[in-house]
Amino acid sequence: MSMKAERGLPMQKNEDSGEDTVFHRKKKFLKRYQRILKKIERLDEKIGEIEGQLTSVQSQRITDMPRGGQPVSAAELISDRDETRIRKAALLEQAKEIRMEIYMALDTLEDYREVEVLELFFIYCMDLEEISDKMGYTIRHTIRFYSSAIRNLDEDVTNVSVKCQ
């Protein structure tokens, strides 16, 4: 079973047709926010790891276990943490801009149900099953809203920043 089928996403019939490439380009535009959120999450984890290392450097434990590798200084860890925080802040700014671009694209849709499905899927990272439960629709109905919403997105709006990512 393909990844699309597992997530409940519609399978595209002919990957070479012009409509499918436009469909995939629009999806790529919408997925940018999810990708940047994953990067931010990874940096958060890295900051947590550095904080843990900083704590262990500051409170040395004496054990009879052999040690390997070069000891890391607190100054190096603080520098790494600060650099990671700066990277995270830059990604947060970029995420805000991308989210606004996505909302502007969603505002071109006429059907509020399509807007809600795409917002929940691409901004709030819910899967289609969760969305159908939240909205009170069947999964099949939700998939229809998802597919038609992406097809109905204004192509001019979604072309703006796809090349940047």
Image (cartoon, grey):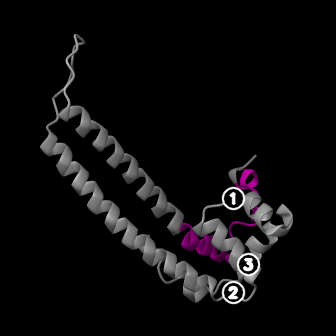
Do the residues bearing badges 2 and 1 touch, measured as CB atoms within 8 Å? Answer: no
Whether residue 58 is visible, yes or no, is yes
Instruction: Point out residue 77 in the picture as x, y percentages from the top left corner.
Output: 20, 44
Q: Element under label 1?
A: loop
The residue located at (55%, 78%) in the rendering is: 102
In-front residue for pair 102/65 = 65
Query: Please, what is the dominant secondary structure of the magenta stretch?
Result: helix
Question: Which disc is residue 109 wearing?
Answer: 2
Does residue 141 lie above or below 64 as drawn? Answer: below
Do the residues bearing badges 3 and 2 touch, measured as CB atoms within 8 Å? Answer: yes
Q: Who comes first in sequence, dot 3 or dot 2? A: 2
Q: Is residue 80 left or right of residue 100?
A: left
Q: Element under label 2?
A: loop
Question: Which disc is residue 114 wearing?
Answer: 3
Q: CA distance from mark 3 to mark 1?
A: 14 Å
Q: Few, some or many C-alpha atoms within 10 Å of disc 3 (few <14, some 14-19, many ≥20)? A: many
Do the residues bearing badges 3 and 1 touch, measured as CB atoms within 8 Å? Answer: no
